[in-house]
């Protein structure tokens, strides 16, 4: 009887200790949103930084990516980002395209552009992190299984927020394209340049209207994974998957997936 009572008391004691330990661990678990804010603050305090990344676009379900990009860049003087991009080595297009962006009143503006494809502004990882902070409906979650001394957080933009974010990004790129239309007519004879520009503007308006129509019926998911150095609170890697689903004019379903993966280093 005494032995049974002893075992019963030990079981209660062990349960209490385990419960206290679990509660204690939970109580001191860091909020992933706070981890993200510290990383963004740490990045904002650095004058210079380098990054390198890859991006790929897939427009159907066959598993292969249609287009792949490689890019690299530098953050200078807190408010200037220079990006260089080119298609994957397997592509026949070897031209390097570059873009200089400057932050003015909390917005990144293109200062110089060399080539119109791809649109390089979307590869600016600093702008991506700042955009995540500004979005309203998002969820943060701590991911486990990362190397010692590192932290990984997952950020997901909820349905309508993801559609709005991607819509704004596409609309900005459309506006950028419109501003470049006059330069596309530079090789056209002077007497036909006005007519050519008119046709380009008509085509642009048609494509813009079609894009807006698609977006009104679109669904989207946008997920980021941010790897952070615990010691410095600085971002080490940012990866994302953005998927948008919509119906074409004839009602056929369409899906596009953009995957990016960028590494940060050389902080100063």
Image: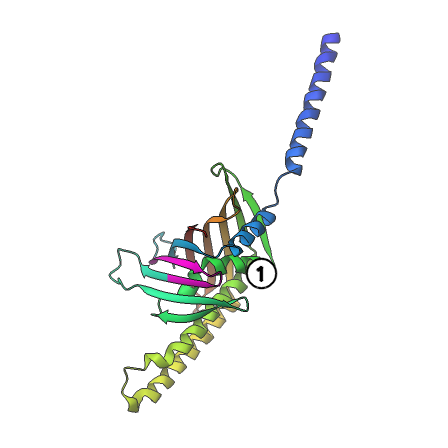
Given residues 117 and 84, the one toward you in this image is 84
Q: Residue at x 37, y 79 (%)?
A: 181
Taking 203 as reference, is 262 above or below it?
Answer: above
Asked if residue 118 shows in the view, the reply is no
Asked if residue 198 shows in the view, the reply is yes
Q: Position of residue 232 (x, y in %)?
A: 52, 45
Q: Residue at x 70, y 17 (%)?
A: 10
Q: Position of residue 143 (x, y in %)?
A: 53, 42
Does residue 13 appear to the left or right of 246 in the view shown? right
Disc tally is 1
Label 1 element class = helix
Going by the picture, which residue comes out furthest to the bottom?
191
Quarter of the image that includes the N terminus:
top right
Taking 182 as reference, is 247 above or below it?
Answer: above
Q: Which image quadrant for residue 71? A: bottom left
Tell me which segment is drawn in magenta. Answer: 66-83
Q: Residue at x 63, y 34 (%)?
A: 25
Q: Is residue 77 magenta?
A: yes
Q: Position of residue 161 (x, y in %)?
A: 56, 61
Q: Main secondary structure of the magenta part?
A: strand
**Coloring applied to the structure:** rainbow
Q: Which image quadrant for residue 96? A: bottom left
Q: Is residue 181 magenta?
A: no
Q: Position of residue 69 (x, y in %)?
A: 34, 58
Q: Residue at x 41, y 54 (%)?
A: 50
Does residue 224 appear to the left or right of 31 in the view shown? left
Within-10-Å neighbours for mark 1: few <14, some 14–19, many 20+: few
Does residue 217 appear to the left or right of 91 in the view shown? right
Badge 1 is on which residue? 134
Does residue 29 appear to the left or right of 178 in the view shown? right
Q: Which image quadrant for residue 89? A: bottom left
């Amino acid at each position: 009887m005494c032995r049974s009572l002893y075992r019963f008391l030990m079981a209660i004691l062990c349960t209490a200790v385990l419960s206290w330990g679990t509660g204690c661990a939970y109580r001191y678990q860091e909020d992933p949103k706070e981890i993200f804010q510290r990383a963004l603050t740490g990045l904002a305090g650095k004058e210079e930084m380098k990054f390198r990344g890859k991006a790929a676009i897939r427009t159907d379900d066959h598993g292969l990516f249609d287009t792949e990009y490689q890019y690299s860049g530098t953050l200078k003087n807190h408010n200037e980002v220079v990006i260089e991009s080119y298609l994957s080595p397997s592509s026949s297009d070897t031209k390097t395209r570059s873009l200089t962006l400057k932050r003015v009143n909390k917005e990144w503006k293109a200062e110089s552009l060399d080539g119109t494809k791809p649109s390089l502004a979307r590869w600016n990882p600093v702008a991506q992190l700042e955009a995540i902070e500004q979005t309203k409906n998002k969820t943060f979650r701590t991911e486990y299984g990362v190397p010692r001394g590192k932290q990984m957080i997952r950020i997901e933009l909820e349905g309508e927020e993801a559609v709005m974010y991607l819509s704004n990004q596409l609309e900005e790129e459309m506006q950028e394209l419109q501003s470049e239309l006059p330069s596309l007519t530079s090789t056209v004879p002077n007497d036909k340049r006005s007519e050519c520009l008119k046709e380009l503007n008509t085509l642009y308006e048609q494509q813009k209207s079609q894009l807006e129509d698609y977006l009104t019926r679109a669904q989207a998911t946008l997920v980021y994974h941010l790897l952070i150095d615990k010691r410095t609170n600085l971002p080490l890697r940012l990866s994302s998957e953005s998927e948008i689903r919509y119906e074409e004019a004839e009602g056929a379903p369409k899906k596009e997936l953009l995957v990016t993966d960028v590494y940060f280093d050389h902080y100063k």
